[in-house]
């Protein structure tokens, strides 16, 4: 087993460090000689894909947060409404789904029963189902109309890490493919984003190379009772996933919030010493989201929160209000989740390890939940 872990303490640690490859491999072989995006696996009629008027992403757990990231990217690039729904909620609420709906089922294992039941229901309603799955030969791809495989390699640790980054990557490819097919983007625009995507594995590696400080802080925080996570736009699902990792691995009460929602409730939770991770959008982004989130940091800091900030290289505006800043390389806003989530994974893994917990096999959880 030690050899299988490649020198790492745990599969979780190894899989976190495998993430540059998981993303690179998921991008591999998906362009032609001219560098144009080709997704041969999407075996759904182009005429059907052109007439789709709604996309519904269904998934559970971490895969559902990958779906949330997909929503921001696909709506922006394709101008098609995207809903993201937990598979078990989708299945039993009589959803509006028909021949013009594309359902995207996201699952690492391809065996999650809740997701499978939702896939069946969607197909019964006439929708086409595209699966984004990591495991070849699994059930969901067999029952779907098409499958876009993530190439993360086998994920052993129960809580998902590298599959999450690969799912987000596959969702970007799908979004760009649809934008190209439906005429929402010019070929050179698609190529430019593909180039940015191909630069992400090196940037993820840089985040890993710089993770020493986050590990140190995680070890100091081993006795922490509660941690909050705030994010906005694509940082919101990142915050949710950061909280989920901490619950799963370290059994700590953790909650993720949309930063804009802070004043509508969660700010009441802030008391002196409360640790809060804040995922800050790029200052180069649109709509002043950066300054809005910096104000949030200021507000919680003024109430005594310990602010642990994830920000882009060069962002000095966060410093005065941050107890700690974890800088990540610059990237386009929509791609930033591939970087921002990594320190949160490392934090949860390290803190749980410091507590003496088995990060590969957290209590009460199963890698693949094959019952409803
Ligand atoms: C279980 C695992 C999670 C995973 C979820 C969905 O709850 O513990 O880590 O995110 O299932 O699994 P799937 O295989 O469908 O992605």
Image (cartoon, helix red, strand yellow):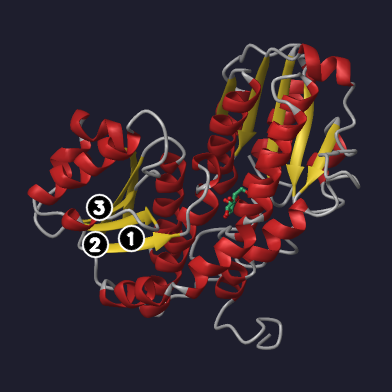
> Are dots 1 and 3 in contact, CB under 8 Å?
no
| 144 over 198 or under it: above or below | above
Which quadrant, please, contains the C terminus? top right
> Which residue is tagged 2?
225
Asked if disc 3 is less than 8 Å from ligand 1, the answer is: no
Mark linked to residue 318? 3
Spot occupied by residue 275 in the image (x, y as percentages of width and height): 22, 58
Nearest to N terminus: mark 1 or mark 3: 1
Mark 1 vs mark 3: give the one in front: 3
| 325 over 358 or under it: above or below | above
| SS of the residue under disc 1 | loop
Q: Residue at x 33, y 47 (%)?
A: 255
Spot occupied by residue 68 in the image (x, y as percentages of width and height): 53, 36
Query: Furthest-front residue in view?
Result: 188
Q: Is residue 30 left or right of residue 199?
A: right
| SS of the residue under disc 2 | loop
> Which residue is tagged 1?
252
Mark linked to residue 60? none
Q: Residue at x 75, y 63 (%)?
A: 153
> Are dots 3 and 2 in contact, CB under 8 Å?
no
Q: Is residue 141 left or right of residue 366?
A: right
Which quadrant, please, contains the N terminus? bottom right
> Disc 2 versus disc 1: distance between alpha carbons?
6 Å
Disc 2 crowd, CA 10 A, few/some/many (<14, 14-19, 20+): few
Spot occupied by residue 108 in the image (x, y as percentages of width and height): 69, 51
């Amino acid at each position: 087993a030690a050899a299988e872990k490649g020198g790492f303490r745990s599969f979780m640690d190894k899989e976190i460090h495998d993430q540059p490859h998981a993303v690179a491999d998921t991008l591999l072989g998906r362009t032609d000689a001219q560098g144009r995006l080709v997704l041969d696996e999407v075996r759904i009629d182009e005429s059907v894909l052109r007439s789709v008027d709604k996309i519904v992403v269904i998934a559970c757990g971490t895969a559902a947060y990958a779906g949330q990231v997909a929503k921001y990217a696909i709506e922006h690039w394709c101008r098609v409404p995207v809903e993201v729904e937990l598979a078990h909620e989708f299945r039993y609420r009589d959803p509006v789904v028909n021949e013009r709906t594309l359902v995207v089922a996201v699952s690492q294992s391809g065996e999650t029963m809740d997701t499978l039941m939702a896939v069946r229901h969607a197909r019964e309603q006439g929708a086409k189902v595209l699966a984004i799955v990591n495991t070849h030969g699994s059930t969901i791809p067999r029952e779907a109309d098409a499958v876009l495989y993530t190439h993360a390699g086998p994920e052993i640790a129960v809580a998902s890490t590298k599959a999450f980054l690969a799912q987000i990557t596959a969702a970007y490819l799908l979004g760009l493919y649809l934008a190209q097919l439906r005429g929402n983007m010019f070929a050179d625009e698609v190529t430019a984003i593909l180039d940015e995507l191909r630069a992400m594995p090196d940037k993820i590696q840089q985040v890993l190379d710089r993770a020493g400080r986050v590990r140190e802080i995680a070890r100091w925080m081993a006795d922490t009772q509660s941690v909050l996570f705030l994010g906005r736009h694509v940082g919101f699902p990142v915050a949710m996933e950061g909280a989920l990792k901490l619950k799963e691995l370290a059994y700590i009460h953790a909650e993720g919030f949309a930063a804009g929602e802070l004043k509508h409730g969660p700010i009441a939770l802030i008391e002196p010493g409360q640790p809060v991770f804040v995922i800050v959008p790029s200052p180069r982004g649109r709509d002043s989201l950066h300054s809005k989130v910096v104000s949030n940091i200021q507000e919680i800091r003024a109430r005594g929160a310990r602010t642990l900030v994830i920000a882009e290289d060069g962002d000095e505006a966060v410093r005065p209000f941050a107890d700690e800043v974890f800088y990540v390389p610059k990237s386009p806003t929509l791609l930033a989740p591939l970087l921002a989530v990594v320190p949160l994974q490392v934090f949860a893994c390290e803190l749980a390890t410091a507590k003496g917990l088995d990060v590969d096999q957290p209590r009460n959880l199963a890698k693949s939940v094959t019952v409803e």
